[in-house]
Image: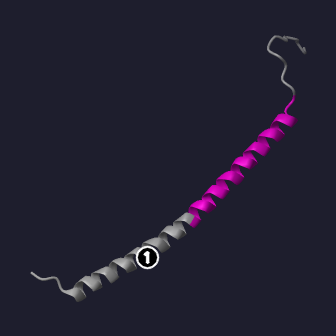
Amino acid sequence: MALDLDTLKKERDTLKESLRDLEIQQRKLETEIKGFRQREIRIKREIEALSTLIEVTEPEKKPAGDKKSDS
């Protein structure tokens, strides 16, 4: 059975188009992932900033060995 040249070319063109579609989808997903990473970094920084504020505003804790009574 001989392979038809036109059929092979059509199949190749179809595969090339599929590849282009996949590459477009990949770029869109990479952009979306980058946005997620940026959000993750921003949220981690906000958590760190809030933790620092909590530490600064929290009353100093007494050392474990200090058992003074305030009554």
**Residue receiving disc 1:** 21
Query: Which amino acid does the dot numbered 1 rest on?
Result: Asp
* Magenta segment: 31-59
Please give left or right for residue 63 compared with residue 16 in the image: right
Residue found at the far left of this picture: 1
Q: Quarter-wise, where is residue 35 in the image?
A: bottom right
Q: Which residue is painted at 57% across and 60% down in the image?
A: 33
Q: Secondary structure at mark 1?
A: helix
Q: Is residue 40 magenta?
A: yes
Q: Is residue 1 left or right of 14 when viewed as pictured?
A: left
Closer-to-camera residue (35/64):
35
Name the one closer to the observer, 45 or 50: 45
Residue at screen point 88% across, 12% down = 69
Asked if residue 25 is positioned above or below residue 34 in the image, the reply reads below
What is the x, y in percent for residue 19? 40, 74
* Principal secondary structure, stretch drawn in magenta: helix
Residue at image point 78% right, 44% down: 50
